[in-house]
Image (spheres, rainbow, N blue to C red):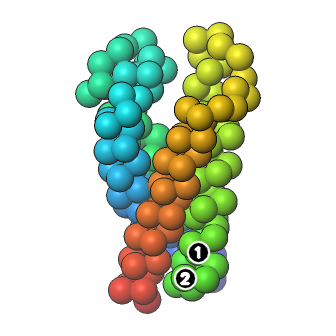
Amino acid sequence: MATIAHARSRALTHAGRGLISGLGGGVVFGALMAVTAMLPIVAMLVGSESAAVGAVVHLATSAAIGLGFGVLAGAVADRVRTVLPAGLLCGVVWWVLGALVLMPAFPGMPLFMLGPPAMMRLMGHAVYGLVTAAILFGLSRTHV
């Protein structure tokens, strides 16, 4: 029983660190999205065109993705050579799922549209993944 409780406690710790890390990555990526006027497009997911609403939706999504990343990568979060590539992979996966599939699917646009805007979004998602992983690494190193 103690082993199950310990595993559950560790999973909650990883999830909490991931949530905080995802918010940090989301703030950095959100700043990039604000500069490129992408936040109103994110707001369309909830029926708005407000940049402020888009920022809230983006940060909530970033926190949720970070939580999942924390649970999945938490066991290796104290190893920079492992967690940074995992963060980059997470960013790329969410670029495919989010920018190439989910975002265009909502308004009925074509999926998998590649071109300069998609490449800019890839860079943003890569930055999100790397920043999220770096924060997770820092939190894991300071609270071992």
Q: Are marks 1 and 2 in contact (CB under 8 Å)?
A: yes
Is 59 rendered above or below residue 89?
above
Residue identified by numbered label 2: 80
Is 116 rendered above or below residue 64?
above
Q: Is residue 64 left or right of 23 when viewed as pictured?
A: right
Residue under the point 60% across and 41% down: 119
Residue 63 appears anywhere in the view: yes
What distance separates the C-alpha of mark 1 from that of mark 2? 5 Å
Instruction: Report how many numbered discs are placed on residues in the image.
Output: 2
* Quarter of image, res 90: bottom right
Spot occupied by residue 85 in the image (x, y as percentages of width and height): 63, 70
* Disc 1 residue type (three-letter): Val
Label 1: how many Cα within 10 Å (few below 14, some 14–19, many 20+): many
Is 35 rendered above or below residue 45?
below
* Disc 2 residue type (three-letter): Val
Label 2: how many Cα within 10 Å (few below 14, some 14–19, many 20+): some
